[in-house]
Image (cartoon, helix red, strand yellow):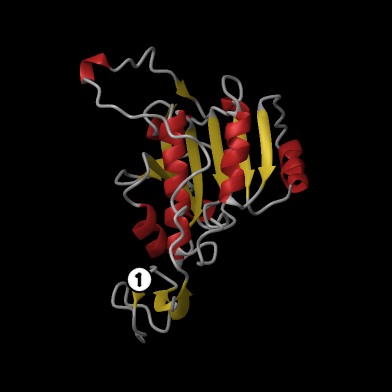
Amino acid sequence: MKQKTVFLCGDCGYESPKWYGKCPSCGAWNTMSEFKEKPVSAARGTNTFQRGESRPTLLKDIDTGDESRFHSGIGELDRVLGGGAVHGSFVLVGGEPGIGKSTLLLQMCQEMCKNARVLYVSGEESLKQIKIRAARLHISSPELYILAETDMEQIINETELLEPDILIVDSIQTVYKRDLTRCPGGTTQIKECAMSLMQYAKNRNVTILLLVMLTKRVRWQARKSLSTWWTACCISKGIRRSVPLSACGEKPLRLNQ
C-alpha cells in the first residue's frame, strides 16, 4: 500500500495534503513539515486496560456519598477546584517553563497522600532529581510513588498494577504512543495521550492532574488540542508577575505564598 504524504503545522497541528508557506489555521509562517503516514493500525486508540460497561443512569439514582474531595493543601487551588479535586476528575495544570509547576505538584502530594495513594509520573526528570527536590521540600510519604517513564502504554500498565487514587503526569508533551508516527509533543500525540488518560480516569474513577508547559509556540497548540477535555484548568504565571493562579474564564487568584 502506497504511503500517503501529509504536511503538518508544527504550531497548531493543522494537516494538509499540500504544503503552505503560511498555515491556513493559525497563520504561522514556514511551520509546515512533510510526513509519511503509515497505514492505520487496528489497535490505534485502544488501551491495555479493560473498559468498564457504561449504562444510562437516572440522575436521582446517582450516589455521590459524602462527596469526598482530595485537598491539595493550597487554599487558592482548592478554591479553584470547588473545594478540592473530585474523584475521577481530569485537571490540567499549565504554566511557562521553569515557573515551578513540578515543585507545586510535588508539594501538593504531601497533603494529598494523607488520604490517598499518589503516582507521580515524570517524563522530564530522573528519579534522583525528584528525590533531591523532595528532600529539599521535606516531602516524605509512604503513599507517594514515583515513575520515570514516557511510554503511554507502560504508564497505563504500571498505573493498573498500582491502582492509585491520584495520577500526576509531568508533562503531557513528553509522553507518546508507540503506534503513532508523530513525535512527542505534537498535536496528534497530545490528543491521543490525553484521550487515553481521560478514558482511564473515567473508567477507573482516578483523579488525574495533567501538567502542560505553555510556551509561546505551545499556547495555540494546547488550546486547540485540550480545550474541550479538561474538568478544570489551572494556569500558573511567574513570580515576576505576582504569581497568580487562575481557572479558565476566571479572574486571577492571588497566592499568599
Q: Residue at x 53, y 55 (%)?
A: 177
Q: Residue at x 40, y 40 (%)?
A: 253
Locate residue 100, reporting x and y percent.
58, 49
Locate residue 85, reporting x and y percent.
44, 29
| Residue 156 placement, left or right of 228 | right
* Label total for image: 1
Label 1: which secondary element: loop
Screen quadrant of the N terminus? bottom left
Locate residue 209, reporting x and y percent.
49, 40
Locate residue 127, reporting x and y percent.
74, 45
User: Three-letter amino acid code at disc 1?
Assistant: Tyr
Residue 237 visible to the viewer: no
Q: Which residue is mark 1?
A: 14
| Image: 199 above or below 226 | above
Q: Residue at x 65, y 49 (%)?
A: 149
| Residue 19 placement, left or right of 144 | left
| Image: 119 above or below 126 | above
Query: Residue lying furthest top in this view?
Result: 66
Q: Residue at x 49, y 37 (%)?
A: 208
Question: Which one is nearer the viewer's eye here, 106 or 238?
Answer: 106
